[in-house]
Amino acid sequence: MNTNRDDVLAKVPEVTFGFWVTKIAATTLGETGGDAVSMSMNLGYLVGTGIFAAIFLFAVILQIRSQSFHPFMYWFTIIATTTVGTTLADFADRSLGIGYAGGTTVLMALLVSSLWVWHKTLGSVSIASISTPKAEAFYWVTIMFSQTLGTAMGDWSADTAGLGYGGAAAVFTAMLALIVVAYYWSTLSRTVLFWAAFILTRPLGAVVGDFLDKPVSEGGLELSRYSASAALFIFIVIAIVLFKPRAAKAAH
């Protein structure tokens, strides 16, 4: 059987309903898992960032060196970006005193810069273009920035803006719904809509994660960060098995 070389080199999944379900669960796990290490284990944001950054780099190297798409490896790398994004954003916002608004602004600039450099270098930021190690490197750096930005956005909306966890979750869900409407009933760029949705699923996961593990006095359910993280991890594994993600076709 002949196998198209671009299909073999495509190491990101097709964007389907299952992709977004798994993505939201992974971003929620990133919040509870990051908080478990930095807060519940009392390691602090800086040490937590160091631990998760090492895991992130290890996962990205494995992902890039792999010769084909592996669903569990891909989602492990996504989870690594969400956990390092959680502790890094918390370190910048709280330990460095930048604040949620300042952190959101800086991270937005980094994300836009990453997308701009990626586009200037390779000519496209579409997932269909991710068929080379260089494109993969840009992809994972951009995702890491988007996950970190999402944490800061979630904290800013829930705390500084006073929306609370439920209100912030409702706002981000509504924004994602608008993107769905734009996808089916507009001619807006599918690449732009993809990255907009990808970015917004992170703050949604962040506020849902905070809702699960923050104290009742702060509007949360005060669940164990360890048990919540374990439950989310099991859910992600089940989702991967049920949805059976396939590699996206690379552009010719």
Image (spheres, rainbow, N blue to C red):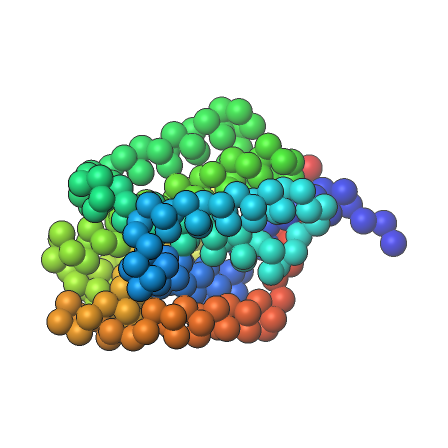
Residue 40 image-quadrant placement: bottom left
Q: Relative to residue 131, is residue 148 drawn left or right?
A: left
Q: Residue 178: give x, y in percent of width and height.
A: 32, 56
Task: Identify the residue at image location x=19%, y=70%.
Answer: 215
Q: Nearer the viewer, residue 140 or 45?
A: 45
Q: Residue 110: give x, y in percent of width and height.
A: 35, 33
Is residue 239 in view from this perspective?
no
Relative height, residue 237 to residue 77 (above, below): below
- In the rendered image, the quadrant that contains the N terminus is bottom right
Q: Nearer the viewer, residue 40 or 89?
A: 40
Relative height, residue 234 to residue 17 (above, below): below
Q: Residue 78: give x, y in percent of width and height.
A: 49, 53
Q: Nearer the viewer, residue 200 or 64?
A: 64
How many numbered marks have been drawn onto this rendered protein structure?
A: 0
Q: Nearer the viewer, residue 29 or 45?
A: 45
In the displayed orientation, state which residue is furthest to the front. 42
Task: Identify the residue at image location x=69%, y=37%.
Answer: 252
Q: Relative to residue 40, is residue 188 drawn left or right?
A: right
Task: Identify the residue at image location x=54%, y=28%.
Answer: 123
Relative height, residue 110 to residue 164 (above, below): above
Task: Identify the residue at image location x=22%, y=44%.
Answer: 95
Q: Relative to residue 156, is residue 204 drawn left or right?
A: right
In the displayed orientation, state which residue is furthest to the right. 1
Is residue 90 in view from this perspective?
yes
Residue 73 image-quadrant placement: bottom right
Relative height, residue 85 to residue 172 (above, below): above
Q: Residue 44: give x, y in percent of width and height.
A: 30, 52
Q: Relative to residue 211, is residue 248 drawn left or right?
A: right
